Image (tube, rainbow, N blue to C red):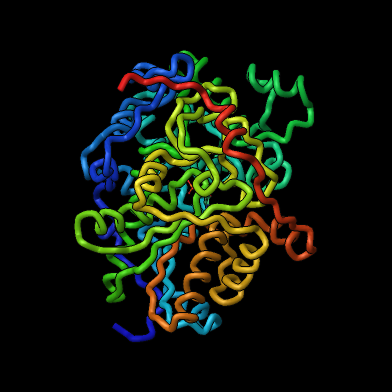
C-alpha cells in the first residue's frame, strides 16, 4: 500500500450484508413511542397506518444485525461502497499533524446519504403492497432520494416540500419530478392542517414540522393505499444508514488507522448515527475510546440547548410522540441555508446516547461553517452541502486543536452530501448576505409547549 494514498476503495462484495442495530447495545431500554392522541405507548396497529410492518419491526428490534435484502444490496451497488478519502490537501492547508479522513456519501446517485434508507424503505413498502408513499422534504435531498427509490420499485410518491426551499431550490423539485414524483409547496391546500395554516397566514413559509403533518395526514386518510416515509429521526432510518460506518471501519483498516474522533452533522441524526454507531459498537464491546461528535447549527441547537422530554414529531400533533432533545414542536427556525438541519427534534437513539454521555455535541455558527465549506471546496475540490459543512467545520477545528497541542489525531467525518444544488446559499455567502442566526429561547418556554406525559412506571 502506497504511503501517499488518497482514496480507500472497497469492492461491491464488501457492501455490508446486514445493518447494525444500536438498539442491541443501548445502555438502557429506549423510552416508549407514544400515540399523539392518547399519550399512551403506541400500538403496532396505530403505526401500521403509516408504516409497513417490516419497518415497525425494525424500529423495535433488539437484534444486533438485520439482513439487508438482496434486492436492496443490488441497488446499493449503483453507488456503494462509497470512497473513504484522506483529505491530504486540507491537512496541508491547515498545516496540521492530524490525519483527516472523510466518507464520501456525496457520491451516491442522489448526492447524499439519504438513498441508503430511501431504497430500503421503498423495498419494504412495495413488499407489503403499498401503492404510494407520501413524505416531506426540506432542502430537497430526502425528496430526491425517495423519488429515485420509488421509481426503482414502481411506486407513486407525493412530496410536501417546505415552501421556502421550494422557492429557493427549484432544481431539487425538477429532479424529483424527473424521477416521477409529485411535488407540492407546503403548506398546501390539499390537507386540513395546510388549509388552516394558509387561512391564518397565506405567506406561511412552511417548516419541516408542517410538511410532516401534511404528508402524515394524507397517508392516514388514504385507507391503507398510501404510507408515510420519513428520511431521518426514526430507528429504522438510522439502522439503514449503518452501512456508512461499517464500510468506513474496513476502509480505515486498509489505511492502517483507527479514528480518535468521528464527526457528523445532525438534523434528525441519521447520517451521524450511520457513521458513528458502528464505531460506538467498538467502544462498547471492543475497548475502543473514539469520541463521537454530533454537530448542529446554532440556529437549531436541539442537543445543545433543547429539553430532553417527550414531544410531538410534527407541528399538528399527528405524528408519534417521542422522547428527544427538542426545541418544541411548534418551533419555526430561522431560514438558514442548511435546510436539512432545521428540525425541532432529534433521533431518540442519539438523544438517549447523548444523555448517557456516550456522544458529544457542539453547535457551530453559520459564518465559520461557510468559511470551512469554501476551504474544503478549494482544497479537496468538492463543494459540500451546507449541512455537511457543519461536520467539516468541526473536523477542521479538531485538526487545528491537534496542531496547537502538537499531537497526531485521526479524524473521520461524514461528507453527507454535495452542495451543487445549494449554490444559492453559496451565492448569498459571496454577496455578504448571510446572517448569523442564533436561537433565543428559554428552557421554561420550551417546557410550556410540551405535552404532559404521565406514564405508569
Ligand atoms: C438531510 C441531510 C442532512 C441531515 O439529516 P440527518 O438525518 O441528520 O443526516 C445532512 N446532510 C445532508 C446532505 C442531508 O441531505
The residue sitting at 38% across, 30% down in the picture is 125
The residue sitting at 66% across, 44% down in the picture is 440
> In screen coordinates, is 150 left or right of 48?
right
Residue 242 lies, in percent from the top left, at 34, 50
Residue 134 in view in this figure: yes
The residue sitting at 27% across, 65% down in the picture is 250
Identify whether 307 is placed above or below 376: above
> In screen coordinates, is 372 left or right of 151?
right
Residue 276 image-quadrant placement: bottom left
Residue 4 lies, in percent from the top left, at 38, 85
Residue 422 image-quadrant placement: bottom right
The residue sitting at 45% across, 46% down in the picture is 269
Quadrant where the C terminus sits is top left
Identify whether 126 is placed above or below 354: above
Quadrant where the N terminus sits is bottom left
Identify whether 348 is placed above or below 314: below
In the foreground, 287 or 214: 287
In the foreground, 22 or 107: 22
Amino acid at each position: 500500500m502506497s504511503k501517499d494514498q488518497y482514496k480507500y476503495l472497497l469492492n461491491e462484495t464488501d457492501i455490508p450484508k446486514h445493518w447494525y442495530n444500536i438498539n442491541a447495545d443501548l445502555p438502557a431500554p429506549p423510552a416508549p413511542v407514544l400515540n399523539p392522541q392518547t399519550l399512551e405507548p403506541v400500538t403496532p396497529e396505530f403505526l401500521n397506518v403509516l408504516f409497513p410492518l417490516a419497518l415497525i419491526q425494525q424500529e423495535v428490534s433488539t437484534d444486533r444485525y438485520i439482513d439487508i435484502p438482496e434486492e436492496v444490496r443490488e441497488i446499493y451497488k449503483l453507488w456503494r461502497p462509497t470512497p473513504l478519502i484522506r483529505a491530504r490537501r486540507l491537512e496541508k492547508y491547515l498545516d496540521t499533524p492530524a490525519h483527516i479522513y472523510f466518507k464520501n456519501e456525496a457520491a451516491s446517485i442522489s448526492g447524499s446519504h439519504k438513498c441508503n434508507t430511501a431504497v430500503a424503505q421503498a423495498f419494504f413498502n412495495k413488499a407489503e403492497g403499498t401503492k404510494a408513499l407520501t413524505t416531506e422534504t426540506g432542502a430537497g435531498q430526502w425528496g430526491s432520494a425517495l423519488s429515485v427509490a420509488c421509481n426503482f420499485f414502481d411506486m407513486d410518491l407525493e412530496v410536501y416540500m417546505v415552501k421556502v426551499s421550494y422557492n429557493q431550490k427549484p432544481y431539487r423539485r425538477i429532479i424529483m419530478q424527473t424521477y416521477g414524483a409529485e411535488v407540492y409547496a407546503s403548506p398546501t391546500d390539499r390537507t386540513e392542517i395546510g388549509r388552516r395554516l394558509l387561512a391564518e397566514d397565506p405567506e406561511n413559509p412552511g417548516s419541516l414540522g408542517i410538511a410532516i403533518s401534511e404528508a402524515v395526514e394524507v397517508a392516514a386518510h388514504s385507507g391503507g393505499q398510501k404510507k408515510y416515509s420519513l428520511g431521518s429521526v426514526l430507528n429504522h432510518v438510522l439502522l439503514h444508514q449503518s452501512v456508512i460506518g461499517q464500510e468506513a471501519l474496513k476502509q480505515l483498516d486498509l489505511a492502517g488507522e483507527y479514528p480518535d474522533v468521528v464527526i457528523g452533522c445532525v438534523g434528525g441524526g441519521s447520517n451521524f448515527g450511520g457513521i458513528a454507531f458502528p464505531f460506538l459498537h467498538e467502544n462498547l464491546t471492543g475497548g475502543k475510546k473514539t469520541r463521537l461528535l454530533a454537530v448542529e447549527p446554532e440556529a437549531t441547537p436541539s442537543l445543545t440547548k433543547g429539553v430532553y422530554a417527550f414531544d410531538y414529531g410534527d407541528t399538528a400533533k399527528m405524528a408519534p410522540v417521542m422522547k428527544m432533545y427538542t426545541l418544541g414542536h411548534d418551533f419555526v427556525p430561522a431560514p438558514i441555508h442548511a435546510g436539512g438541519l432545521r428540525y425541532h427534534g432529534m433521533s431518540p437513539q442519539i438523544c438517549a446516547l447523548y444523555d448517557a454521555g456516550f456522544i458529544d455535541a457542539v453547535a457551530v455558527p453559520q459564518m465559520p461553517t461557510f468559511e470551512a465549506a469554501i476551504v474544503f471546496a478549494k482544497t479537496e475540490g468538492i463543494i459540500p452541502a451546507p449541512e455537511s459543512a457543519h461536520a467539516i467545520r468541526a473536523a477542521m477545528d479538531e485538526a487545528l486543536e491537534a496542531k496547537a497541542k502538537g499531537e497526531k489525531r485521526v479524524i473521520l467525518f461524514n461528507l453527507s452530501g454535495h452542495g451543487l444544488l445549494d449554490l444559492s446559499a453559496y451565492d448569498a455567502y459571496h454577496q455578504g448576505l448571510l446572517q448569523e442566526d442564533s436561537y433565543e429561547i428559554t428552557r421554561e418556554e420550551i417546557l410550556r409547549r410540551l405535552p404532559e406525559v404521565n406514564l405508569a412506571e
